[in-house]
Amino acid sequence: MVQDQNAHKRRAQLAQDPVISVVVPMHNEQDGLARLFDVLGAALTDTGQSYEIICVNDGSRDQTLLGLMGYAARDARIKIINLSRNFGKEAALTAGLDAAQGQAIIPLDADLQEPPELIGKMVALWQEGYDVVLAKRIDRASDSWFKRVSAGLFYRLLKLLSDVEIPENVGDFRLMDRQVNAALRRLPERTRFMKGLFAWLGFTQTTIEFTRPARQEGEAKQGLRKLLNLATDGLVSFSGTPLRFWGYLGFATAGLAFVYGVVIVLQTLFYGVDVPGFATLTTVLLFFNGLIMINLGLLGEYVTRIFTEVKQRPLYLVRDRINFDNTDDDDHAPPVD
């Protein structure tokens, strides 16, 4: 009887939930709000489906929140999650995905470098039965030379080392079925490399391709340091190969050192050859000390992530929710009183 009641309640919820949820993390995006809602609203209207737009204000210091509140006051389909501070894009995206109620969920960057015009094609492929529809960049001419080269190297390295196959040139922009998002919400890690988490989930997937346009308003929020940190998170979170590599290197080095030591002993015993080599000895010591320090740094990266997981802090804290129902899912991070 209880199961029948739960099933009925679930069917009723599906009937009133929006079909499409678009999740947009935002940090200092006041200049691009008008264009974002014009383009995104038109693309969603063309699908003919009900929708919601969840905007996550990730500690913006400009007038982003004020602008969002103005749009939300005019359109109840625009919902706002205002975080207590800047938690970073990965946490902000997680907050939006946790709150999404749609049957299909689409993460989208506020800079519109992933064109919302593709949403119609994504929805059509989803209706054909695909659980995930990926959007792949085939032309990154709008990016700087350094970003194109570094991104290419990163994806190649990740493909070589990662335990999970992560699609190249595929960002967060994708469509996910509700059950895929439910599976994603079961992944508890605090250090979140979303591209890797998406790939780990699996499910039936297809890909559409697009040419990435140039950013129209504002400026990129992720500098070199943040990009390097994100790349490190991706490599460390989805591969144990770096640790295994240092183990193999240690065995190989120890073997070579043993062979070289035997050669020196034999030369001394049979030929009486002294081994002066002070400069050689110094170089060898510095080289292996350097290897030890690199190894310790790598171990530190893994230990840091263990420390972060053990603390069990929430991924984000919500200060305000606007245009949401009063009853939120228990799994959502609660607002701060």
Image (cartoon, rainbow, N blue to C red):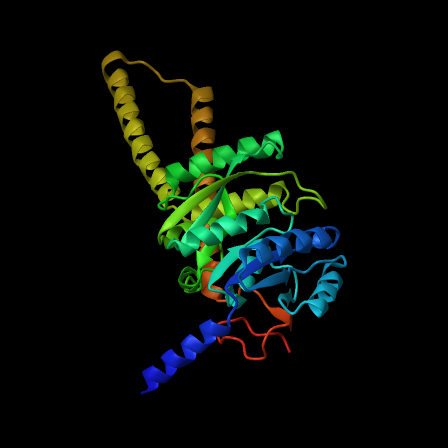
* Coordinates of residue 29 in the picture (x, y in percent): 70, 53
* Coordinates of residue 251 in the picture (x, y in percent): 30, 35
In this rendering, the answer to whether 154 lies above or below 25 is above
For the residue pair 162 and 274, the one nearer the viewer reads as: 162
On the rendered image, what quadrant is the N terminus found in?
Answer: bottom left
**Residue 97 as seen in the image, left or right of residue 259:** right
On the rendered image, what quadrant is the C terminus found in?
Answer: bottom right
Residue 273, quarter of picture: top left
Residue sitting farthest toward the bottom? 1
Q: Is residue 296 visible?
A: no
**Residue 186 as seen in the image, left or right of residue 212:** left
At 70% across and 51% down in the image, what residue appears? 35
For the residue pair 160 and 33, the one nearer the viewer reads as: 33
At 42% across and 18% down in the image, what residue appears? 277
At 74% across and 61% down in the image, what residue appears? 67
* Coordinates of residue 106 in the picture (x, y in percent): 52, 56
Residue sitting farthest toward the top? 271
* Coordinates of residue 73 in the picture (x, y in percent): 72, 69
For the residue pair 94 and 282, the one nearer the viewer reads as: 94
